C-alpha cells in the first residue's frame, strides 16, 4: 500500500472540467492533488494543464480555486502566454538560455465535452472509462455552464468520503431535511468496469411531479428522470436529479495522507430560452445551497471515521445498499494486484 494515493493519481486519467467551464482566455481552475497543485488554463482559446509552479523559482502562479487572470508569477513576473514563457528583464539572464523555460504540463484527452488530465496513465482514456464513456458523452453534451463552485478540506481519509458518497444507507440519518426529502427508492446499481452508477426513482410523489413539470423549460436530450449518481474510479462523482443540473465532485487525497481535498461544481444544462433562465434561477440557487448543506453534513460524519477504520478488505457487515462499497474495494484490490512494487 506504499504510495497508494499518489500512484492512483499518477496512473489514472482524471476528469478535470467541462469545456464550458473555461470558455474565455485567462479562465483557470485549480485542483489540489496528492502530487501538488494542478491548474487547467485557457491560453488564448487552447486549454492546457500544468503543475502550478513557475519554471523560474517554483512559486505558485494561481492561488484561487477558479477565476480569470494572466498566468503570471507574482514573484518575478514570469508569464505564460500563447504557448511560451515570457521573461521580464531577459538581459539579466545572459548566462543562460531562458528560451528553454517551460511549464510542466500534463497530458489531456476528451470524452465528449469533458476534459481529462493524466500524468502517466496506464491505459488510454476510453479504455479506462469503458462503458461509462457513452454516459459521460450524453451528460457532457447537455451542459451549458458552471453555476457554483464549493471547495474545502474534509478532515478524513479520501476513501472514507468516497464510500460515503457511494452508499445511500446513511441518507435518512444524515440528510433528513436535504437529500432525504427526495425519499429515494432502492433503485439499481450498474457496474461499468471499476466505475459504477446508481439510478434511484424519487419516492416523494409531490417533488417528482414538480420536477417533471419543469422539463419543458430545458433544451436537453438526455437526463435520467430520477436521481442518478455516477462514480468514476478513483476520485470522482457526478450526481443529478432529472438531469437539470449536475454536481461534479472530487475527493482528492491531500499530500499529508490524512485529509481530503473536496470540491463540488454545480453545472447547469441548456435552457429553452431566456424566459426559462429567469424562471429557473431560484431553482438553481436553491440547488446550490442544498448541495452545500448536503456536503457539509457528509463532512461532519466522515470526520468521525479514522483512517485506521478503512481498508480494502470487504465489509464485515455489508448492507444491501452498500453494495457499491464492495465494488469500490474490489476495484482497489484489483488495481493493487495488477501493479508491481510494494
Image (cartoon, rainbow, N blue to C red):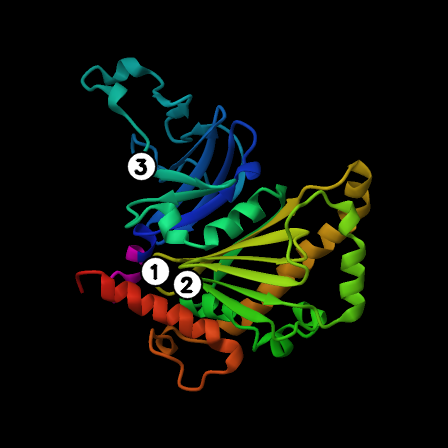
- As drawn, the residue found furthest toward the bottom would be 317
Does residue 297 show up?
yes
* Residue at position x 72%, y 51% in the image: 285
Q: Is residue 188 left or right of residue 2?
A: right
**Mark earlier in primary sequence (1, 3):** 3
Q: Is residue 45 left or right of residue 187?
A: left
Q: Is residue 6 magenta?
A: yes
Q: Residues within 10 Å of mark 3 (few under 14, many from 20)?
A: few
Label 2 sits on residue? 259
Q: Are marks 1 and 2 in contact (CB under 8 Å)?
A: yes
Could you tell me which secondary element the residue under label 3 belongs to? loop
Could you tell me which secondary element the residue under label 2 belongs to? loop
Does residue 64 show up?
no
Question: Which span of residues is magenta-colored?
Answer: 1-7
Q: Which mark is residue 256?
A: 1
Q: Which mark is residue 59?
A: none
* Residue at position x 42%, y 31% in the image: 74
Residue 252 percent coordinates (x, y): 42, 56
Q: Is residue 313 magenta?
A: no
Label 3 sits on residue? 58
Please say if 27 is above or below 286: above
In space, the residues marked 2 and 3 are separated at their CA atoms by 24 Å
Quarter where residue 56 is shown: top left
Q: Residues within 10 Å of mark 1 (few under 14, many from 20)?
A: few
Q: Are marks 1 and 3 in contact (CB under 8 Å)?
A: no
* Residue at position x 28%, y 13% in the image: 91
In space, the residues marked 1 and 2 are separated at their CA atoms by 7 Å
Quadrant of image for the N terminus: bottom left
Residue 245 percent coordinates (x, y): 65, 51
**Mark earlier in primary sequence (2, 3):** 3
Amino acid at each position: 500500500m506504499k504510495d497508494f494515493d499518489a500512484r492512483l493519481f499518477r496512473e489514472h486519467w482524471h476528469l478535470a472540467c467541462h469545456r464550458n467551464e473555461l470558455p474565455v482566455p485567462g479562465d483557470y481552475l485549480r485542483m489540489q492533488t496528492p502530487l501538488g497543485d494542478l491548474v487547467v488554463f485557457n491560453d488564448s482559446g487552447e486549454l492546457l494543464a500544468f503543475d502550478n509552479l513557475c519554471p523560474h523559482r517554483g512559486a505558485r502562479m494561481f492561488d484561487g480555486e477558479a477565476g480569470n487572470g494572466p498566468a503570471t508569477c507574482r514573484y518575478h513576473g514570469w508569464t505564460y502566454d500563447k504557448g511560451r514563457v515570457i521573461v521580464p528583464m531577459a538581459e539579466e539572464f545572459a548566462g543562460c538560455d531562458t528560451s528553454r523555460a517551460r511549464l510542466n504540463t500534463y497530458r489531456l484527452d476528451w470524452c465528449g465535452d469533458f476534459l481529462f488530465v493524466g500524468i502517466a496513465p496506464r491505459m488510454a482514456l476510453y479504455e479506462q472509462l469503458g462503458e461509462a464513456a457513452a454516459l459521460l458523452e450524453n451528460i457532457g453534451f447537455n451542459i451549458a455552464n458552471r453555476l457554483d463552485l464549493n471547495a474545502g478540506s474534509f478532515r478524513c481519509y479520501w476513501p472514507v468520503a468516497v464510500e460515503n458518497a457511494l452508499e445511500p444507507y446513511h441518507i435518512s440519518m444524515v440528510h433528513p431535511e436535504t437529500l432525504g426529502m427526495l425519499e429515494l427508492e432502492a433503485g439499481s446499481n450498474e457496474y461499468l468496469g471499476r466505475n459504477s452508477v446508481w439510478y434511484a426513482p424519487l419516492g416523494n410523489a409531490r417533488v417528482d411531479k414538480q420536477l417533471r413539470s419543469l422539463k419543458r423549460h430545458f433544451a436537453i436530450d438526455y437526463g435520467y428522470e430520477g436521481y442518478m449518481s455516477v462514480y468514476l474510479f478513483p476520485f470522482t462523482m457526478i450526481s443529478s436529479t432529472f438531469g437539470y443540473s449536475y454536481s461534479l465532485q472530487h475527493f482528492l487525497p491531500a499530500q499529508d495522507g490524512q485529509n481530503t481535498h473536496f470540491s463540488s461544481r454545480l453545472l447547469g444544462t441548456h435552457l429553452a430560452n431566456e424566459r426559462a433562465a429567469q424562471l429557473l434561477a431560484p431553482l438553481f440557487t436553491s440547488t446550490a445551497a442544498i448541495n452545500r448543506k448536503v456536503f457539509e453534513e457528509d463532512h461532519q460524519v466522515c470526520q468521525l471515521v479514522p483512517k485506521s477504520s478503512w481498508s480494502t478488505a470487504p465489509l464485515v457487515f455489508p448492507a444491501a445498499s452498500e453494495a457499491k462499497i464492495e465494488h469500490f474495494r474490489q476495484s482497489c484490490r484489483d488495481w493493487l494486484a495488477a501493479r508491481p512494487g510494494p
